[in-house]
């Protein structure tokens, strides 16, 4: 349709002759298009909004966890790490590793300043260096540069907020009891898109996989979730399971899949990047 008007898009996705409406991107515009389509009875795929989640287990390798965080924050797209959950029993080791990972990502192989933004879920403030809660840094956002506290406290009920950062890496940090606690939070607050468990315990991986309602589950960086990258095939979009399993199909909408499957990745190189 040769029109850039918003009303044209609204009319298009509301057309009941459509078998499927695919809205690519993220944010309020995609949510609006999806809501209009569903209101008209048209199945909608909202291209995996909400960002990815990661769980750092009590049984994870410290270096592998740090690398997974770094490689999941190279740039802001739909599969970028948004929420990082860390096992309480190893928080003293894993929190610094996560902060090193996000700082390395922010340095961009020497091209950046290493400045990042952290949101700490209320009740977990004591697990991060206190100077981060007081330090003021320059955060680059879509409307320009802003002076902000480097770390701020976030209510638990806002864990599902997707950080639409521009040049300053941004994520939420939450301390959890175990993989079951992490999965519960994921299922409650996330858009149910990407969940990665960093652990050397295979049984823990299986438990995590069985507990999270996510179409994409992995054991390394979150950025593997891409039809072209992971499956070497064109994609129409990536669907989360926030509104159920679209057509009972996989999260990758390729146009030729008719089976109910979940995509699962096994990363053997902790430093794997896109």
Image (cartoon, rainbow, N blue to C red):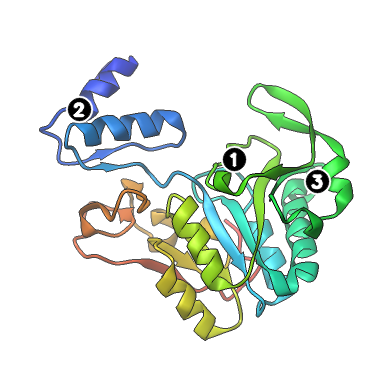
Q: Picture quarter containing residue 215?
A: bottom left
Q: Residues within 10 Å of mark 2 (few under 14, many from 20)?
A: many
| CA–CA distance in space, label 1 to label 3 | 18 Å
What's the residue at 50%, 74% (across, down)? 266
Mark 1 in CB contact with mark 2 (< 8 angstroms)? no
Q: Which label number is shown at residue 264?
A: none
What's the residue at 64%, 70% (across, down)? 270
Q: Which label number is shown at residue 14?
A: 2
Q: Earlier in the sequence, mark 2 or mark 3?
A: 2
Q: Residue furthest front?
A: 123
Is label 2 in a helix, a strand or a loop? loop
> What residue is pinned by disc 1?
163
Q: Earlier in the sequence, mark 1 or mark 3?
A: 3
What's the residue at 69%, 64% (across, down)? 67
Q: Quadrant of the C terminus?
A: bottom right
Q: Nearer the viewer, residue 180 or 205?
A: 180
| CA–CA distance in space, label 2 to label 3 | 45 Å
The mark closer to the camera, 2 or 3, is 2
Q: Locate residue 187 relative to residue 45 in the image: left or right.
A: right
Instruction: Decide if residue 225 is in sight here.
Output: no
Q: Nearer the viewer, residue 221 or 213?
A: 213
Instruction: Decide if residue 136 is in sight here.
Output: yes
Residue 57: x and y in percent read 63, 73
Q: Quadrant of the N terminus?
A: top left
> What residue is pinned by disc 3?
114
Q: Residue furthest left?
A: 17
Q: Residues within 10 Å of mark 1 (few under 14, many from 20)?
A: many
Residue 18: x and y in percent read 15, 35
Question: Relative to residue 81, is residue 3 depicted above or below?
Answer: above
Q: Locate residue 229 relative to residue 38 in the image: left or right.
A: right
């Amino acid at each position: 349709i040769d029109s850039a008007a918003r009303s044209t898009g609204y009319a298009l996705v509301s057309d009941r002759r459509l078998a499927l409406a695919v809205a690519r991107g993220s944010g309020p515009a995609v949510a609006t298009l999806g809501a209009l389509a569903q209101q008209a009875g048209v199945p909608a795929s909202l291209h995996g909004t909400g960002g990815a989640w990661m769980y750092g287990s009590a049984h994870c390798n410290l270096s592998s966890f740090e690398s997974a965080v770094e490689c999941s924050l190279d740039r802001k797209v739909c599969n970028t790490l948004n929420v990082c959950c860390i096992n309480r029993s190893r928080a003293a080791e894993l929190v610094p590793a996560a902060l090193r990972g996000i700082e390395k990502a922010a340095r961009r192989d020497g091209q950046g300043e290493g400045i990042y933004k952290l949101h700490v879920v209320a009740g977990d403030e004591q697990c991060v260096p206190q100077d981060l809660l007081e330090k003021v840094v320059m955060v680059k956002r879509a409307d320009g540069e802003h002076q902000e506290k480097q770390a701020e406290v976030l209510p638990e009920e806002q864990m599902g907020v997707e950080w639409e950062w521009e040049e300053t890496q941004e994520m939420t940090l939450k301390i959890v009891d175990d993989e079951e606690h992490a999965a519960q939070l994921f299922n409650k607050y996330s858009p149910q898109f990407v969940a990665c468990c960093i652990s050397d315990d295979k049984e823990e991986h299986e438990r995590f996989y069985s507990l999270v309602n996510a179409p994409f589950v992995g054991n390394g960086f979150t950025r593997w979730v891409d039809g072209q990258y992971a499956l070497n095939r064109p994609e129409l979009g990536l669907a989360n399971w926030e509104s159920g399993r679209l057509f009972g199909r996989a999260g990758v909408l390729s146009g030729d899949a008719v089976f109910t499957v979940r995509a699962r990745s096994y990363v053997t190189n902790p430093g794997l990047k896109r």
